[in-house]
Image: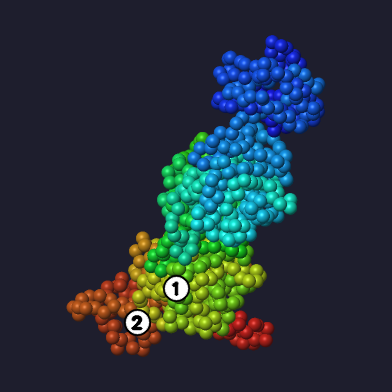
Amino acid sequence: HMGFYWYGRPDLHYHTGWYPYTRHVGRKDYSGEWLQLDLGKVSILTGLVTRGHGYYWYHAWVTAYQVRVSRDGSTWSEIECGRIFDGNHNRWSYKYNYFDQAVKARYVRIYPYYYHYWPAMRAAAVICEAKCHNSMLDYNFQRTFNSASGGPSLETPWGTSWWPRGGGYHWHRHQGLKLKASACVSNENKYSIVLRFRFDHVSHSRAVITSADWDSNGLFVHKGVLELRPSSLKCDEPIRRHYYYYVAITRSTNGEVTLYLNGAKCASSKPKSSGGYKLDKDEMRFFHGPHGQNSGGYVKTLKVFGKTLSESQVAKECDCKAPKYLDTSCDNDKTVVVSPAHKEYKASSFWYGGPMGSVGSYPKLNSYDAWYARRNNRRQWLQIDTGKKQAIQGVVTQGRRRHNQWVKLYKVSVSNDGTTWQNVDCGRLFDGNKDRNTRVRQLFSKPIQARYIRIHPMRWHHHISMRAGVIICETKCKDKQLDFQMEDFMSETGGPGLDAPWGPGQFIGQVVDKRKDYRGYDMGRRWGYSKEECDAACKSDARCKGYVLGLWNNAGCWLKYEMTTNRREHRWVDSYFNVNTMWYNYKAPTGYKFNRNAGLQLNEKSCIKKGDEYTIIIEARPEDEWGRRRVLGSGGWGDKGAYIVNRRFEMYPSASGLSCKDYRISRQFFYKFGITRTKKGEVKLYINGYECASGKPSYADGYKLDTEDIQFFHDSNRHFSTWGYIRRIQTWGEALNATSMANASGCALPNMNVDSCGDKGSLFKATVKDIDFSGVRHRHDYGTGYGQGWDLEQKGYWISAIDDILSQWMQVDLGEVRTVTGVTTRGGDNGHHCKVNSYIVRTSEDGKLWTEVECGRIFYTEWKGYHSSANENIEKLFDKPIAARFVRLYPVTWHHHICLRMQVNTCPKAEKKEEKKEEKSKKIAPLTTLSLKHYADHEEEHKEEHPYHQEIEHTLASDARAERQDALREYKDEQKRLEARDERRDERLRELEQGVETKKPETLTEEISRLV
């Protein structure tokens, strides 16, 4: 059939031809094989041109033929009474035959008369040139060099190539096209030329438009860039081989020449060389340059106008529907990168069928993997919803994290409604990635007002896989504050965004980790549970740290007593954290995970102008605690800054005097590291919102901040860096006070408006009624077995129902609000050798509202071996006394099991004064320590003279006297115990003094200070 590649392509310049089914030819009644041409309309026919079959294997051509014509396709007339015209002598040459007299016809039939091997041929009609319309020539290359608007035809003086099946015309290198446009274009001073073509080669110089009048100059693609030689007119967008481009050049009567690429204006000036590039009406050359500066390629459109087209007219001719561009760019080129939640992304296809946030569908920047398309073709796209109409400046792309797959080249389109789309910069091709994780930014020529954006991959490495974000204009920050909550790099209060110039990390959902499984640590499966039921089941169990929810029907969930970094990709489950637990606050691996020495950088100059006064809070979980690990640095600080130095948060160098010596930093725990600086140069350090160091250092210009270069967890020497997780970063352009720092860190301070008792206080003696536990092992009753521990000197102790971090507790009720100075703990006994190694303390005045001591400080007990550590009283005093009635201790780490003996250090109660004298005679004087001591010391010697003696003797009943005597005996027993303790202390001090040579000075000093 006609159009078949081998036998039905009679186009004159095609590389095969028409090959009839039979050799039935040479009949006077025209009953043999014939080939018909349709001219499209009735035209003046002057002759024919023929060629043999193009395929070299056949060697077939027509050596003679007859011609008949018709205007309607029904009534036919012979040309010159059936004249036999000479045909071809080979398969490649052109044979022109002109009629003695031109005829009007639309249809032309050629009847082979003689042939070589087979009556195969290619043919075309020769017609008279028609007048061009509106001084325009329009060549669409539909297997013809004629203009659709009339006028002269294109010529191929350097050789003719072939017509591709997809339309257009293909020319080989050193061929090209030639045009004589004088019959249509009269004014050489103004013109417009529009081309749509693609080059096979773009290296060196490749001619696009040249002319004899322009000498060796003209429009070239030089080293991949469109330029008008030798002028300065040049387009910045690169031209790539094997991609179609619209190229336009216009000239106005005042000599201004303008270049367009894909309908977008890219260069304009008034060149003086080559006669100002006036149009050579007699000889325009396309794709044929001097000295071999040519390239083969394909052309689909060539239009010549005898006028200067406007920008909008050029855009229309180039099929460019431009979106709404903004006249101005972002203020001072301040931009931020937005990578919204996975639900805001859409795609043309998914490798595993979706949805977003599942395996194969992680398109967020720095996400766990990437989005990868189902198929590799140029019909794929990735869409981002920015949430509202706003100024979009560009896009940022990454490859696939775990495989060598990325998009190398892409186009971008935008929309306001998600339905109607316009190409950015008229379909410009943007460079993509060259590796897996490097973030590549591409800015548009101007900001575009839009909501939705689509990225269309055009070239890729191995497979279409990518992660992407949008560049938008930076908004003004509120109240000189930046708040990064690490769902992305955007601040919740506006302003600049964070950057990761030393390598990307990944974001981990802080509530739900989509399509991730946390393996192991199962508490059991809940078959058929819904999400709400799983959530309720987890929150009702103190051990539950979260749950993994199956996404198939009636899958239920798995409750977890631990959710560590042992996470993996899983397309059929979601993981939810129990955010109401203390474990989540202290340990859950959520937020932004950064690699070693690949921290973050912030330029906050647009929000905070000066660095002489500031506040920074970093909520992070560092994974290295020993050595020197950088936390905060800034331009001009050099190697100085905030570090974790052997488990202590401090400013380097240590001579600055800023060190949180009493606070130990442990790996795999979250801390809120805070630093403030006043205009007067006073620097303070905070941990979890609690002040731990202050001073006026002179180093690094008093640690003034370079607001254009703030570095988090990065050091020029990777040995002084760490890896870990960041949940939040906050900065202010002022120095917050202690109360504001506590509030900003989420710390509710207890009532510390109490008078100190001047020392560590005394141990509160509790009874079984004053004690409560989260649970007791084997459910032993309070006061028996493992339900003891309120007396340090008793052998009984408390063992928790389960060994679980920060969910078990032991509570002491002081009976009333008292001044608490600390707690004293001791381990188990009876061969268990178990103890609590670290803990936090919470206090309350009413048993309902609880606050953490020193903003959640973790108190550590020293390890001195099994026996000494478990059986020694270890006292931990608070930084300041606290008013409280209830005191709870939450174990964080332990040895063997959570087992504990605990007493609370309190200040003595103040002596009560009776307001009414008549009631004083009816009541017993308060049994304070002072009155008991006085009574005991002088009971016999001053029995008759004691100020209380007569009152006691005459007002107390016998049972009251017995109660007072019991209290007195208890006091004496306590005095004996204290004397024994003092003797043991003095003996230990003597031993230490004798063993000075074998003890380290710092160890000796610490132990002596503790004993004293």
Of residues 421 and 361, the one drawn nearer to the viewer in this rendering = 421
Query: Looking at the image, which residue is at 63% across and 49% down?
Result: 209
Residue located beneath label 2 in the image: 931
Of residues 585 and 197, the one drawn nearer to the viewer in this rendering = 197
Q: Residues within 10 Å of mark 2 (few under 14, many from 20)?
A: some
Would residue 150 appear left or right of 388 to someone viewing this image? right
Would residue 33 appear left or right of 383 to someone viewing this image? right
Give the answer, above or below, for where 90 lies relative to 565. above
Residue located beneath label 1 in the image: 609
Q: Position of residue 656 (x, y in %)?
A: 54, 82
Q: Residues within 10 Å of mark 1 (few under 14, many from 20)?
A: some
Tell me which corner region of the image, top left, top right, bottom left or bottom right, holds residue 46: top right
> What is the secondary structure assignment of the residue under circle 1?
loop
Q: Quadrant of the N terminus?
A: top right
Would residue 421 appear left or right of 143 to someone viewing this image? left
Query: Looking at the image, which residue is at 57% across and 27% down?
Result: 43
Name the residue furthest top: 29
> What is the secondary structure assignment of the residue under circle 2?
helix
Tell me which corner region of the image, top left, top right, bottom left or bottom right, holds residue 863: bottom right
Of residues 75 and 297, the one drawn nearer to the viewer in this rendering = 75
Tell me the kind of residue under disc 1: Lys
- Residue 977: tell me if it is visible: no
Q: Earlier in the sequence, mark 2 or mark 1?
A: 1
Name the residue furthest front: 100
Q: Position of residue 571 (x, y in %)?
A: 57, 42
Query: Looking at the image, which residue is at 48% across and 83% down?
Result: 696
Q: Position of residue 405 (x, y in %)?
A: 65, 48
